Image (cartoon, helix red, strand yellow):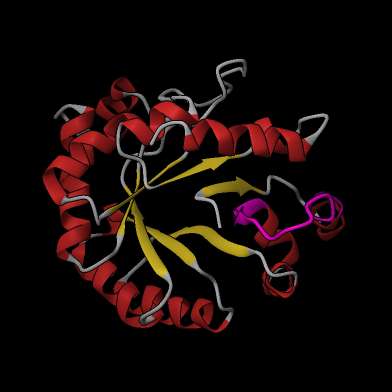
Amino acid sequence: MHKVIVALDFSSKEAVETFLNKFETPIYVKVGMELYYQEGPAIVELIKSKGHKIFLDLKLHDIPNTVEKAMRGLAKLGVDMTNVHAAGGIEMMKAAKKGLGEGPILLAVTQLTSTSEAQMHHDQLIKVSLEESVLNYAKCTQEAGLDGVVCSPLEATMIKEALGEDFYKVTPGIRPASSEVGDQKRVTTPKQAREIGSSYIVVGRPITQALDPVKAYNDIVNDWEAGK
């Protein structure tokens, strides 16, 4: 299965089914907060029943005990990938890993791709550079025993060089060359993302809002493959 993950930016089961029925073979999809909080665990079960892989993007961030128990529940859903916020700390991330168990890929979010360095300085009172903050979170993630991070593709090379090829870099902020940037601040094309070290890419609106979603998906997969 291709390492292009389609963000299902929908709010209902009906919209998801309409979209997925356009595809003849299974794909990797991302279920985020909007969809999961509207439809609950049933949406995961539905998507899995159709053979698709799921990145359940809930970005858990709480005390270690709560996160561990929540992850036990997510493990029962059979998700293929899920995540926490690295800002929750190493002990929280270890608890998440313990709750999820072996099998699914567990990631930590470093800095959201919608966050600029100026916002990070002002809102989070983190005074180092954005790159230093991301790398520190990535190092903590690896120390906690997680499989990788969610980061901007612009930071993938830095993380690969510091933490190795096998440490996953899952990168949103992907836009085809002809697409608008939208609310993302740190973006690249699929081909560029692979060239600079992304392990998986996450693409939403350029596919889900396309007139022909299957063609848009295939075009992005081809661009990603060109980055080998």
Q: Percent x, y for residue 98?
A: 31, 81
User: 144 and 200: which one is in front?
Assistant: 200
Residue 117, magenta (yes or no): no
* Quarter containing the C terminus: top left
- Reply above or below: 3 against 211: below
User: 213 and 139: which one is in front?
Assistant: 213
Residue 24, magenta (yes or no): yes
Which residue is painted at 66% across and 64% down in the image? 52
Which residue is painted at 46% across and 63% down in the image? 82
Q: Percent x, y for residue 16?
A: 79, 54
Residue 105 lies in quadrant: bottom left
- Using the rendered image of the protein, determine whether residue 205 is visible from the camera's viewpoint: no
- Using the rendered image of the protein, determine whether residue 226 is visible from the camera's viewpoint: yes
Which residue is painted at 75% across and 40% down in the image? 214
Q: Percent x, y for residue 76?
A: 55, 84
Q: Percent x, y for residue 208?
A: 73, 38
- Reply above or below: 4 against 72: above
Is residue 9 found left or right of 114 in the rendered image? right
Which residue is painted at 14% across and 41% down in the image? 161
* Quarter containing the N terminus: bottom right
Number of marks = 0
- Reply above or below: 41 against 19: below
Is residue 105 found left or right of 40 in the rendered image? left
User: 163 and 58: which one is in front?
Assistant: 163
Residue bounds of the magenta highlight? 18-34
